[in-house]
């Protein structure tokens, strides 16, 4: 059994923050941010906006493009590290979409690699049988977890949602040619948003069991990042991963119509394209407008490229995600 991409969609918050806006709260400049990252603007959700609603909108657009009824969806995968419910937000999206047959819906947490993991998981469900239409949504609101005093990281992130619909098909039509996925927990120290240490000891702060029970509930710290290490990691692992996936697919770089990487930094995108010898006109990039939108970045960029007519039916795309975990991976897909 095969699987193919049949629809995509995206959604963005309305609030736009420029580099100049950021330079009013941290010691930075439009020039520094543009030169070092390629980012000029990003969108952010307000506190009263909903990530779940934004993810639902992206999914609705993907279903509309594919002309698939919500009742025919068999599985909803929400790839996010910033759900609005610790227990997962995917069932809320399933409900909002009006999927009347109660399909399975759950969250996948893998930071900026989340969408790729979701895509590969969706393909495995379909190939295993019993699943025909799987929604893969990448949605994140990292703006809610940035330290606005840390100029090295707060300039990078924006909020967005993107979605694709993966559908079962005959094996000759298969559109997911190969993939390659990895994790390295050792590198977690370079990029994390860990549970806050609230100084509790085994018996609570005042040494009693009651003290332990009465301590403040847990929460998460802001994003802590060693940008240089993350940069080096991405430039080292991503080209290799794409080469491995291409090899598994029996393809070469010359067979790729588009290189679509997680949109983290234009210098990372350029370095990977140079290493793989993919010319700039075959590289998709929209991070100037949206910054790093984590799990949303790949489906958001795909959706823009498809709707603008850049990516056409039958095009082969090498896509790769990388980020916290550390996690990384790539997939060779046909649109
Ligand atoms: N404005 C002005 N100056 C700054 C800023 C800023 N926003 N940020 C850092 N600087 C300064 C530093 O303090 C440093 O000053 P110094 O030389 O006086 O010490 C100087 O600029 C150079 O800083 P570096 O950190 O060495 O700058 P670098 O060229 O590495 O760029 C950046 C930093 C943009 C963060 C880069 O390392 C990067 O993009 N790394 C990848 C990060 C990434 O992609 N993270 C997300 C991964 S996806 C996920 O899972 C969430």
Image (cartoon, rainbow, N blue to C red):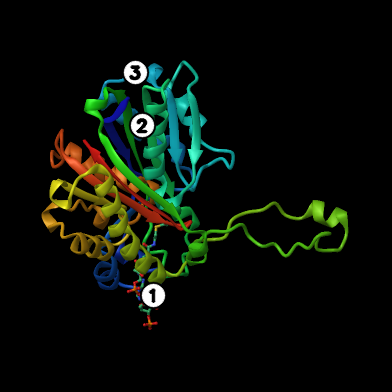
Residue 129 rendering spot, x and y as whole percentages: 41, 22
Mark sitting earlier along the chain (3/1) = 1
Badge 1: residue crowd in 10 Å (few <14, some 14–19, many ≥20): few
Residue 211 lies left or right of residue 192; in this view the side is right
Badge 3: residue crowd in 10 Å (few <14, some 14–19, many ≥20): some
Pick the front one: 206 or 71: 71
Q: CA distance from mark 3 to mark 1?
A: 49 Å
Residue at the spot 66% in from the left edge and 62% down from the top edge: 197
Label 1 near ligand 1 (CB < 8 Å): yes
Residue behind mark 3: 69
Q: CA distance from mark 2 to mark 3?
A: 12 Å
Pick the front one: 330 or 291: 330
Residue 252 rendering spot, x and y as whole percentages: 17, 50
Label 3 element class: loop
Mark sitting earlier along the chain (1/2) = 1
Q: CA distance from mark 1 to mark 2?
A: 38 Å
Label disc, if present, on residue 27 of the rendered structure:
1
Residue behind mark 2: 59
Q: Are marks 1 and 2 in contact (CB under 8 Å)?
A: no
Badge 2: residue crowd in 10 Å (few <14, some 14–19, many ≥20): many
Residue at the spot 59% in from the left edge and 39% down from the top edge: 87
Label disc, if present, on residue 104 of the rendered structure:
none
Residue 298 rendering spot, x and y as whole percentages: 31, 46
Quadrant (top left/top right/bottom left/bottom right) for the C terminus: top left
Q: Is residue 309 above or below residue 239?
A: above
Q: Quadrant of residue 168?
A: top left
Q: Is residue 202 above or below residue 70?
A: below
């Amino acid at each position: 059994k095969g699987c193919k991409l049949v629809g995509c969609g995206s959604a963005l918050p309305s609030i736009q923050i420029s580099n100049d806006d950021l330079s009013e709260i941290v010691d930075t400049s439009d020039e520094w941010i543009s030169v070092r990252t390629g980012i000029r603007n990003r969108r952010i959700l307000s506190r009263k906006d909903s990530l779940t609603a934004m993810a639902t909108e992206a999914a609705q657009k993907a279903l509309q493009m594919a002309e698939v009824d919500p009742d025919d969806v068999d599985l909803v995968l929400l790839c996010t590290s910033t759900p609005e419910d610790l227990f997962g937000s995917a069932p809320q999206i399933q409900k909002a979409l009006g999927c009347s047959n109660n399909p399975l819906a759950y969250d996948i947490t893998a930071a900026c690699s989340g969408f790729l993991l979701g895509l590969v998981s969706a393909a495995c469900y379909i190939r295993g049988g019993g699943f025909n239409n799987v929604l893969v949504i990448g949605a994140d609101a990292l703006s809610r977890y940035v330290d606005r005093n840390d100029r090295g990281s707060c300039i990078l992130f924006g909020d967005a949602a993107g979605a694709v619909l993966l559908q079962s098909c005959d094996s000759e039509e298969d559109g997911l040619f190969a993939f390659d996925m990895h994790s390295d927990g050792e590198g977690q120290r370079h990029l994390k948003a860990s549970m806050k240490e609230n100084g509790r000891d085994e018996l609570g702060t005042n040494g009693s069991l009651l003290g332990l029970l009465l301590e403040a509930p847990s929460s998460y710290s802001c994003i802590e990042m060693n940008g240089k290490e993350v940069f080096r990691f991405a430039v080292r692992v991503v080209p290799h991963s794409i080469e491995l996936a291409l090899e598994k697919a029996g393809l070469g770089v010359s067979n790729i119509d588009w290189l679509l990487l997680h949109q983290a930094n234009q210098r990372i995108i350029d370095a990977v394209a140079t290493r793989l010898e993919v010319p700039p006109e075959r590289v998709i990039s929209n991070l100037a407008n949206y910054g790093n939108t984590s799990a949303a970045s790949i489906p958001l960029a795909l959706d823009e490229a498809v709707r603008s007519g850049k990516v056409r039916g039958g095009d082969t795309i090498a896509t790769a995600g990388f980020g916290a975990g550390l996690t990384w991976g790539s997939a060779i897909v046909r649109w």
